[in-house]
Image: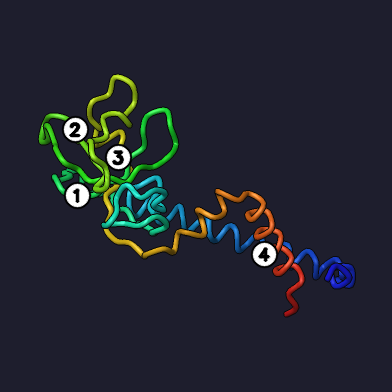
């Protein structure tokens, strides 16, 4: 396999490397474009736990929308806890304020016994809709995100996959 790499002319090798860079930059631009369109810093998330079963299973891929700021009770939102970078997918069970007052939300996982006040940042009793919520769930694809879970739980798999993709692009003949 590596002998084919040595047989490439410098111009062919450069073209294959640029082709790989084009694939990566296209994926990045699509992600950023989707972020602008949905007004969400993370327009697609993966369910990492079973706290929302039976509505969503671990590994489900969720599509978010953050254009409507009047979140209703019963709506499923994704939020970040201040100081942590792990998105949490839970249902709104109570709302306070709205209109001219800042909208505050209380959430709970469908499969959890208690609300999320223990998950919120220290001293925080409710989520601030404008600061904490990433978006509302508007659609999902079951189990497609399980690949992401495997890649995060087994880091060597991520390295192997990236290496395989890079070799495939570089060694591909036109």
Q: Callout 4: few (<14), some (14-19), or many (20+) C-alpha neighbours within 10 Å? A: few
**What residue sits right under mark 4 in the picture?**
165
Q: Is residue 154 left or right of residue 47?
A: right
Q: How is the image coloured?
A: rainbow
- 3D distance between C-alphas at marks 1 and 2: 14 Å
Residue 104 is labelled as: 2
Q: Nearer the viewer, residue 75 or 102?
A: 75
Q: What element does badge 2 sit on?
A: strand
- In the picture of the structure, the residue carrying the numbered disc 3 is 133
Find the distance from the CA under tag 4 to the CA under tag 1. 39 Å
- State which tag comes first along the sequence, 1 or 3: 1
Measured as percent of width and height from the top left, residue 100 is found at 11, 31
**Disc 1: which residue:** 75
Could you tell me which residue is drawn at 69 percent across and 58 percent down? 160
Q: Earlier in the sequence, mark 2 or mark 4?
A: 2
Q: Nearer the viewer, residue 99 or 135?
A: 135
**Direction bottom: furthest residue:** 174
Q: CA distance from mark 3 to mark 4?
A: 34 Å
Image height of 12 relative to 107, above or below: below
Q: Which of the two discs, 2 and 3, labels the residue nearer the N terminus?
A: 2
Q: Earlier in the sequence, mark 4 or mark 1?
A: 1
Mark 3 or mark 4, earlier in chain? 3
Is residue 137 shown left or right of residue 152?
left
- For marks 1 and 2 on the same chain, the one whose residue lies earlier in the sequence: 1
Q: Are marks 4 and 1 in contact (CB under 8 Å)?
A: no
């Amino acid at each position: 396999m590596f002998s084919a790499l040595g047989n490439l002319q410098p111009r062919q090798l450069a073209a294959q490397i640029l082709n790989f860079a084009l694939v990566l930059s296209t994926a990045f631009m699509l992600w950023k474009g989707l972020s602008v369109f949905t007004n969400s810093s993370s327009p697609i998330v993966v369910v990492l736990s079973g706290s929302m079963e039976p509505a969503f299973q671990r590994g489900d891929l969720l599509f978010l929308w953050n254009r409507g700021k009047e979140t209703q009770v019963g709506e499923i939102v994704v939020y970040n806890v201040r100081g942590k970078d792990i998105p949490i997918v839970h249902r709104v069970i109570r709302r306070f304020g709205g209109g001219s007052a800042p909208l505050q939300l209380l959430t709970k996982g469908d499969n959890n016994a208690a609300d999320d006040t223990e998950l919120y940042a220290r001293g925080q009793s409710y989520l601030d809709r404008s600061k904490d919520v990433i978006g509302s769930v508007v659609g999902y694809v079951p189990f497609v995100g399980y690949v992401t879970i495997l890649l995060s739980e087994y880091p060597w798999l991520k390295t192997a996959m990236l290496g395989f993709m890079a070799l495939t692009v570089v060694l591909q003949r036109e």
